[in-house]
Amino acid sequence: MLDQALESAFVAFLGADPAFVDVHFFTGHDEEEHLLPAVTVSSKSEPLAGSAAVFRADVTLLIESEAHDSKPDEHAALVEKVRTRFSSKAAVVAAINAGNRVHLYGYAFAGSSQDVDGLRFRTTLTFKAGYGVP
């Protein structure tokens, strides 16, 4: 339940940006077919130091584009848009907290990876986040 709230908060934050008008957003709990280009947000949380109110999470953003409809540079541009959206930590925290789904204390970029097969370009961005319930 908490992971769903965190994922939904990140999806709402990204989806509010008009730069992503052609992008489909999903949470890791959505079971519908993913239309591409897409960003899927998934998370795995655990209580921080045994707390029932504060949690840490590994948040993964999977950015996918269809390889046969897109060029690698178009996918790279989408990835850069997502990275740029998270570049102002204060603005991200304020926007997510304004949604009242979760209270985000902060986050840090933890890494990225890329993959391609015959059908899709995939880039994974990973964040560490600290959050609580409002």
Image (cartoon, rainbow, N blue to C red):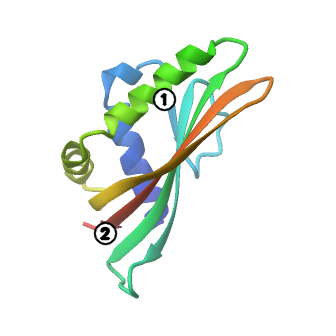
- Residue nearer the viewer, 39 or 27: 39
On screen, residue 8 above or below 39: below
- Is 97 in front, or is 117? 117
> Which residue is at 71% across, 26% downward?
120
Q: What's under tag 2, amino acid-wise?
A: Gly
Q: Amino acid at mark 1?
A: Val
Query: Can you say whether 52 is above or below 85 in the image?
Result: below
At which x and y percent is residue 22?
47, 18
Foreground of the two, 114 or 67? 114
Between marks 2 and 1 in the image, the one whose residue lies nearer the viewer = 1
Q: Secondary structure at mark 1?
A: helix
**Residue designated by label 2:** 132
> Viewed as shown, does residue 13 lie left or right of 38?
left
- Disc 2 crowd, CA 10 A, few/some/many (<14, 14-19, 20+): some
Residue 100 badge: none
Q: Position of residue 21 (x, y in %)?
A: 41, 20
Q: Secondary structure at mark 2?
A: strand
The CA span between labels 2 and 1 is 28 Å
The residue carrying pointer 1 sits among few (fewer than 14), some (14 to 19) or many (20 or more) residues within 10 Å by Cα, namely many
Which residue is drawn at the image coordinates 33% and 40% (left, top)? Answer: 86
User: Residue placed at 38% from the left, 85% from the top?
Assistant: 49
Q: Is residue 98 above or below residue 65?
A: below
Q: Residue 92: percent from the left, percent from the top?
A: 26, 45
Q: Do we see residue 123 in this rendering?
A: yes
Q: In the image, is 5 to the left or to the right of 102?
A: right
Question: Which residue bears the numbered disc 1?
Answer: 79
**Quarter residue 112 falls in:** top right
**Quadrant where the C terminus lies?**
bottom left
Residue 58, given in percent of the width and then of the height, sits at: 49, 61
